[in-house]
Amino acid sequence: MRTVTAPHLGVGIGWRPEIDLTVERLPGVDFVEVVAENLHPGELPESLRLLAERGLPILPHAVSLSLGGADPVDAARVEHLAAVAETVRAPLVSDHVCFVRAGGLDAGHLMPVPRTREALEVLVANVKQAQRLLPVPLALENVAALLDWPGAELTEGQFLAELVERTDCWLLVDVANLHANARNLGTDPVEFLTAIPLERLAYVHVAGGVEREGLYHDTHAHAVQHEVLDLLGELCSRTKPPGVLLERDDEYPTDEELAAELTAIREVLS
């Protein structure tokens, strides 16, 4: 049955073991996201148990389903995501519009999917198969890419719009990835936001990066740039996001710096 309304989430942060105590004491955190592959169902870290007891939604975010790949969906990976979702009583789960494995090799990176009709058919079939194994709705995220496959038949926005239409999935829009692709590939973030069905927006990612030698790196290890917040503002001018989450995966700053980034996000939302 189609889920019409996404749950209200508020402003959140990615939970990582390195900043577990920080996340516990940061003011105004409404929800957290966890990397699903790093959790064992039924064996939550104490910090996550505490957050769950406070009533914070915990959203499992997968990085290994490889739904855009030509290889068959690995049911065990989807079942692990499902078990984690049930453990934390998640309202939804997410992964990416990408592939990470091909021909028995693991890229170790979220590789973009060719935007062709043929690739879309594969993606749609894989998403539907994953949905059948999941106890909650699935949201899919746009990725940052360092290359664009030749022969594209659809823009990224059109590709995702058709994916949503055919699978009824939700969208997890990463505005930092939109910024990265605009800088590195010359894509148009406004065109993307115009093309996608914003009524199927589950929540939004915000993250930092850095430019080196003319290439923008989506590092999740630097401060959020103002251009990313500007894109969040552009999105908010079109719809009210159910949630916005700050990602940080390395070079963790002080509690005060993280709190300031969350405050900046709230200011854009308001």
Image (cartoon, rainbow, N blue to C red):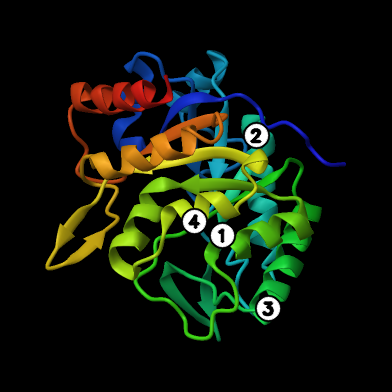
Q: Residue furthest left?
A: 213
- What is the CA distance from the residue labelled 2 to the residue labelled 1? 33 Å
- Mark 1 vs 4: CB contact within 8 A: yes
Q: Point out which mark residue 157 bears.
A: 1
* Residue that numbered label 4 is attached to: 191
**Secondary element at image label 1:** helix
The residue that appears at 41% across and 46% down in the rendered structure is 175
Q: Nearer the viewer, mark 4 or mark 3?
A: 4
Residue plotted at (12% across, 68% down): 213
Within 10 Å of disc 4 (Cα), the crowding (few <14, some 14-19, many 20+) is few
Task: Tell me the residue that label 3 is attached to.
Answer: 117
What is the x, y in percent for residue 15?
41, 34
Whichever of callouts 1 and 4 sits on the residue coming sooner in the sequence is 1
Residue 71 appears in the picture as rendered: no
| 78 and 210: which is toward the camera | 210
Residue under numbered circle 2: 87
Q: CA distance from mark 2 to mark 4?
A: 38 Å
Amino acid under label 1?
Gly
Distance of mark 2 from mark 3, alpha carbons?
37 Å
Q: Determine the CA span between mark 4 and mark 3.
A: 20 Å
